[in-house]
Image (cartoon, rainbow, N blue to C red):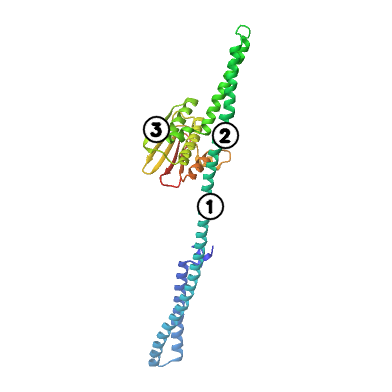
Amino acid sequence: MDRRLNPDAGWRTPQAISLRTSFLYFTFSCLYILLSDWLLLLFIPSLEAYQQAQTYKGWGFVLVTTLLLFLLLSREERQMIRIYQALEKEREELRHTIGNLEEAYREVKLLAQRCSQIEEVERRRLAGELHDRVGQTLTAINLNLKIVKSLLSEDSARAVHERLQEVQTLIEEAAAQIRDVIAELHPPVVEDFGLAEGLKWLAGRLQKRFDLPLAVSCDEKIGRLPANVEMAFYRVAQSALDNALRHSQATHITLTLRQIADRIEMVVEDNGIGFDPQKILKDKEYPSWGVKIMRERMLAVDGRLEIISEKGKGTRLVASWTKGEAG
């Protein structure tokens, strides 16, 4: 940056310019008065001529100081013009930089939207593949095992019956796990019934899996939201609840969906051990991808994500989106 734009640029500051101008004026005035009086006394012995010379000297002082002030102010004016031009140049550069940043932000947001769309499409495809291939195969194997068991004699093949029963149990467990994976990859309840019902369904499944109290409160008046917004809220809730259940050591977790004016707000809160959000984002030793992905999901729909947490004081996650945004 030009030193003239820097308030600490020494003698070029406004205060220094004022002091310098005053000092020069004072010095010139003193020298002019002293020297002119000495010269008049030296060369003009007559009192009348001396008084007349004093008058001319006064007019001369006015003319000379006026000329000097004009030259000095002209110089300062040129300097101020250069400073103004430098400021205009920097402002134009700043405007250009801001424009580039805004364009980069729009590109990042579009990329995040596209990534979310691709992810949901891929999740739907994987869920379909698991259902159509693996799920049906396990169902067929289970049916065949039942047929084999019915064909065996209990007296002659008790051990075989026991083994077949164990295999059948494992297959049923695997089928249940695959159904859970399919539901996590592509939750049809959100598409069919909306965000509120999807969050209740998600909370019920997680509460059953982890056997931990999980209170859910959803404003039924919210109604349906854009599909990508509903899915963004659902995925954030899925990640936040999973993190709370696995890592927070909480004894109570709440999930709240509400509407405040035009803003839709989802809050996930626990009474667990808490953490330092800034450390999570900056420290390489901590896994921060979950937080970053949640923020990117909300960014992709013009939403916001805020995490309030402190060690020993639990965690509060707030995801919000305003109706009328791009979504």
Residue at label 1? 104
Q: Is residue 313 visible?
A: no
- The image quadrant of residue 314 is top left
How far apart marks 3 and 1 lie (CA) works out to 38 Å
Q: Residues within 10 Å of mark 3 (few under 14, many from 20)?
A: some
- The image quadrant of residue 194 is top left
How far apart marks 2 and 1 lie (CA) works out to 32 Å
Q: Residues within 10 Å of mark 1 (few under 14, many from 20)?
A: few
Identified at 48% across, 28% down, the residue is 205
Q: Of discs 2 and 1, which sits in the foreground?
A: 2
Q: Is residue 151 visible?
A: yes
Q: Quadrant of the N terminus?
A: bottom right
Amino acid type for the residue under numbered disc 1: Ala
**Mark carried by residue 126:** 2
Identified at 53% across, 33% down, the residue is 185
Q: Earlier in the sequence, mark 2 or mark 1?
A: 1
Q: Secondary structure at mark 3?
A: strand
Residue at label 3? 217
**Mark carried by residue 127:** none
Q: Of discs 2 and 3, which sits in the foreground?
A: 2
